[in-house]
Image (tube, coloured by chain):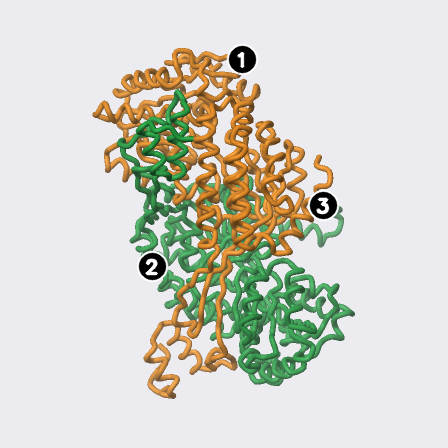
Amino acid sequence: MVVGLEQSLEELRETFRLGKTRSASWRKSQMRGILKLLQEREDDIFTALNQDLGKHPVESYRDEVGVTIKSVNLALSSIEKWMASKKVEMPMIAYPTKGELVPEPLGLVLIFSSWNFPLVLALEPLIGAISAGNTVVLKPSEMAPSCSSFLAKYLPIYLDNKAVKVIEGGPMVGHQLLEHQWDKIFFTGSARVGRLIMAAAAKNLTPVTMELGGKCPAVVDTLASFEEQKVMVNRIVGGKWGPCNGQACIAIDYLLVEEKFAPVLIDLLRKTIKKFYGENTKESKSISKIVNRKQFERLSNLLQDPMVEASIVHGGSLDDDKLMIEPTILLNPPLESEIMTEEIFGPLLPIITVNNIQESVDFIKSRPKPLALYVFTTDETLKRLVIAETSSGSITFNDAIIQFACDTLPFGGIGLSGFGRYHGKFSFDNFSHEKAIMRRNFTDFGFRYPPWNDLKLQFIRAVYSLQYLKLILLLLGFKSGLRRR
Amino acid sequence: MSLTSTATKQQVVKEAEEKKTMVVDSKNAASLVSELRGTFSTGKTRSYEWRTTQIKNIIKLVEERESDIFEALRSDLSKPELESFVSEISMTKASCKTMLKELKHWMKPEPAKTKLTTFPSSAEIVSEPLGVVLVISAWNYPVLLSLDPVIGAIAAGNAVVLKPSEVAPATSSLLAKLLPEYVDKSAIRVVEGAVAETTALLEQRWDKILYTGNGKVGRIVMAAAAKHLTPVVLELGGKNPVVVDSNVNLKVAVRRIIAGKWGCNNGQACISPDYIITTKSFAPQLIDALKSTLEEFYGKDPLQSKDLSRIVNSSHFQRLAQLLDDDKVSGKIVHGGQRDEKRIKIAPTLLLDVPHNSLIMKEEIFGPLLLIITVDKVEDSFVIINSRSKPLAAYLFTNDKALEKKFVDSISAGGMLINDTCLHLAVHTLPFGGVGESGMGSYHGKFSFDTFSHKKAVLYRSFGGDASARYPPYTLKKQRVLRALLNGDIIGLILTLIGWPRK
């Protein structure tokens, strides 16, 4: 239980009331604070990520520090532009009028981040919440304890601690936080917890953003060129075992490939895994460990099913002490087995074969909508088919994971992979209310007001059907001959 | 519960019979949704032609059945014909026409810029339908608030179920009868009913729910949606303030306040002015002007006026009567207050400075009572507004640009209108929706299309330009390349690639 939570929240609400967080200069000063934190405490971050997840500093830089720096820089150079109100065209009917959209902060927001990318998934929404002018409580995941305490220790030093607070803890603390009133809740995690959070949010009519996961498929077309095959397999291996060893909401979950191409693909995957992680992957420093014993056991249970075990074509060895699981490839495990019904979230990669690559579209459509869909192909028809027929948070052609770094694209799910979106300007919008403003002067037309009569109805008909000539005639008093249609 | 009295028994029997004939229960709600999912999965609702055909047919419906609609609205609300024409028929048609004009353009993918980080690549954002959506509408604008969201859902290519409000029964059954005659009933359905039917509908999995109504039911809708992780749009209400400065054109201001308060369904509208805040010194003038203009619009005996809607039903009449009968409130009436219980009518009523702790100051009024609160300085009004939950609409009448700016900067509301009331609802280029207690999500025009669309991010890459720095085994040099790539630092990148050591 958090002691003094009520006072902390009151302090944050008071800060918001005072209007301090609304100024562009405050928002930018916080961005510079985050930047400074990332630059000055880079080694501490690498250490924390290594302790929690065994992430290599290069991986940590690529997936956490570097991506966040990029986002802070974008916010720093864009905040004023994002904050500016937008002029809106007014239709003739409302003449004379001016319209605009003014983005305003929501108030006090709550961010729940997750353990797999404990830095970027905490800071990326935080950047959005602050750049939109809100006060924030961040609850990092207790399953990445070093990163959680890093954030709790250093964010208050580098940021305005009257406006941004980190509250550490597990599910009890989560429940406690949810009892309070928030202006927005941003959650990254599982659908199970997401449902609980949304139900709690409903009590206070709090809008929520749900960043969930799902089984992200990669459709692998039969590529003719060996060079292209090589690049593709680099990207598949990078997209599966690269981001936190498959423990990522946008990691590739399974591959769909034509039966005849499967042996070639498996061979290339094996070679590339060896090239990237060496002969003994469990000794590799370039691959993350499984976050904790519970997750390790969940993953090893997936492999216990005899039918699944029989489908292993590469890897499959587990190291209980180090919580390491070897990159594992499975060929056609039963579709009703748990490994094919649940999100894997780990280093196991099933390959499902189809007769014709186009069949993969139906396969994807028959399952819940994924957060990300990857398609490796040079066939434009297949590309169009996938875009039109399937639904997913995003589609990336011929690469994986990299869409996360593309600020101009919204990041977010659909269906069971969540709702609401963020990154770049979308983060700002997520944490803003777009207030519609309409300004009028005192010029007036009498036909708007009762007592009603037929002439007034004719006026209004003319206005709505944009018959300006008729309107002028009516205004000039030529009412005869203009019968109600 | 004891069942000894015959009256209770009869009631139970009657209820049981009603249940038998219930339009929708959990089981057939489920089969309805799966049938619509079937239609959606054929892809027919995705085509531009299908969408525009349905929308054109809705125009045809409101044009051909205009008199039926007038009749239903008269029966449900005694809504004056002209009001029905303006706020229900014309607005629905305007909404359709906007869609027909803009849809092709909105359906096109939007190109998105890409940067060095993902070079070489191109990107776009594709709008796609969500699937099968549920629209639960309200009784006060039973045509517009039903059809406008349905138009949005169709424009975005969804299959849709509409549950009109049972509190406006004539309009509900008219929509249930007419919509299937005009639109594709394999994808667009109307389900009539009350709590039981709504509950059955809410048990199903939808791809989006748009609810218009009150916060109490809004909470129930969102909690039900949470079970399936369904996103919701909640169009609620709130106490909408009108700040009146003393420098205004009083005649015009008063006309516009009256048109927005009593001219929009007799105050039974979610954007209706709920209370006026003005200065102590200006209040007498304002009240005089309101009184004389009310008389000009609705005559000496407004209960006889044909230009005012009635109260929707006796329970709302009782609710409003109770607000007025509060001891602390009844002495504060400065105009109106007449009511006719038989015809469920209440005259336009003005109340001056009711106590802050009275019920009428806490609850959304949703009826023909208008409060006037006086303050010393007009700026004091901001404190009052900010001490309450965020309203759906906030209005200000002033000629003072500085006050206007302060109002816009310091007050949060779904929408704001300066020097008029309610008109922002009719402008399709502005999003319509609340914030905080007044709701979440927005619609109208492009915002309707967006509300019922998923914005799919699509990134295209080729197989060229592969930076090996992305892949293990990880080295320090790779880290330097990544630093340069992620920072968009071209020179740094080149230096690193040619092997120039840098800190």
Report which colour depicts chain A: orange
The residue that mark 3 highlights is A7
Position in image of residue A152 (x %, y %): 62, 35
Report which colour depicts chain B: green
The answer for which chain carries disc 2 is: B
Disc 2 element: helix
- The crowd level at tag 1 (other Cα within 10 Å; few <14, some 14-19, many 20+) is few
Judge whether B423 appears above or below A57 on screen. Answer: below
Residue B262 vs residue A406, the one in the foreground:
A406
Please name the amino acid that badge 2 sits on: Glu
Mark drawn on residue A320: 1
- The crowd level at tag 3 (other Cα within 10 Å; few <14, some 14-19, many 20+) is few
Judge whether B115 appears above or below B171 on screen. Answer: above
Position in image of residue A283 (x %, y %): 46, 13
The residue that mark 2 highlights is B102
The answer to whether the residues at label 3 and label 2 have Cβ atoms under 8 Å apart is no
